[in-house]
Image (tube, rainbow, N blue to C red):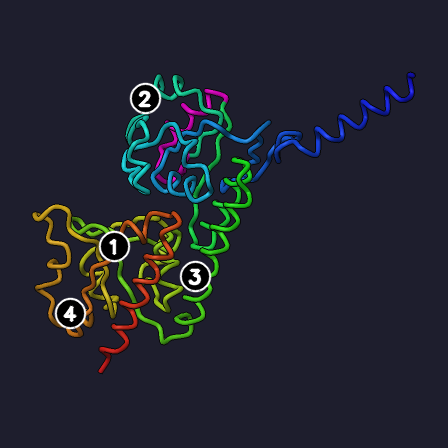
Amino acid sequence: MGTPTRWLRACLVALLAAGAPAGAMAALSVVDDAGRRVTLPAPARRIISMAPHATELLFAAGGGARVVGAMNYSDYPEAARAIPLVGSNSQIDMERVLSLKPDLIVVWHTGNTARQIAQLETLGVPIFHSEPRKLAQVASNIERLGQLLGTTASAQAAAGALRKKLAGLEAHYGQRSPVTVFYQIWDQPLFTLNDAQIASDAIRICGGRNVFGALATVAPQVGIEAVLAADPEAILAGQRHDPANPGLKVWAPYPGMTARKRGNLLTVDSELLTRPGPRTVEGAAALCELLEGVRQRRP
């Protein structure tokens, strides 16, 4: 009877293993955007998102219902507005974080301070650093988060759809004649973005060139004189949320600059272009159309 009993047990083990959900029999492991390996014993069930773009990525990866806490401005998709807040970009409610019992925390190195990340590291909870600086890296983030969530199939589908749209934009606009661009993210004083920010990658995909892309700081302050010297063909700025801010009106005293002369002071949806989430490809598509208009207004 001993041999049949052992055989029966072996069959039961095999059947249980075959019917077990993906990730239940082995640890889940990925490398995040900081080059650190993140390993979970099982798919994440209680996640805290420390940046709006990370919240969007988690929803895109199929894990929106598992996000139990988020940072302020996590407002997309609509369901994200109902997620309890654990803090802002200036302060974290650590007691709230602890009470939510997370098994995964997603942070943003650029948006979260070193002090905040250090605080979170003391909890001993696995941390995934999300820092997409190219549109293609958004798809990679979705796939890796999907692995940690155990939602690989839906995450790969979302990433594949994003890559397809992105490839279409690059094929259509990538070889067009270059447009020099100044991206104005603030007007008093003037701030812009360098090529390490995802908006610059959108400009590149559309056949544009960021005139301050080579600067060392991600969000450098520049002077009006420097912009006039660069004389960009187009100036981009987001919508004014405060009517007191001049926005693109700051260039009214300079009718001789190329962007003014040709009517290329353009308003963009800065949230779509600078928030490195799955909607950046939509922002890039809109930007490509704007830059095509710039080409058509050439003498």
Residue underneath mark 3: 165
| Callouts 3 and 1 close, C-beta under 8 Å | no
Q: Nearer the viewer, mark 3 or mark 1?
A: 3
Residue 275 lies, in percent from the top left, at 33, 47
Residue underneath mark 1: 269
Name the image quarter holding residue 42.
top right
Q: Relative to the observer, which residue lies in front, 56 or 182? A: 56
Q: Nearer the viewer, mark 4 or mark 1?
A: 1
Residue underneath mark 4: 260
Q: Earlier in the sequence, mark 4 or mark 1?
A: 4
Which quadrant of the rendered structure holds the C terminus? bottom left
Q: Nearer the viewer, mark 2 or mark 4?
A: 2
Give the SS element for disc 1.
Answer: loop
Residues rendered magenta in the picture = 107-124
Give, as a three-letter code, the residue at label 2: Asp
Residue at 11% in and 49% down: 245
Give the SS element for disc 4.
Answer: helix
Q: Earlier in the sequence, mark 2 or mark 3?
A: 2
On screen, residue 8 versus residue 105, left or right, reads: right
Taking the magenta stretch, the answer to whether it contains residue 266 is no
Give, as a three-letter code, the residue at label 4: Arg
Residue underneath mark 2: 93
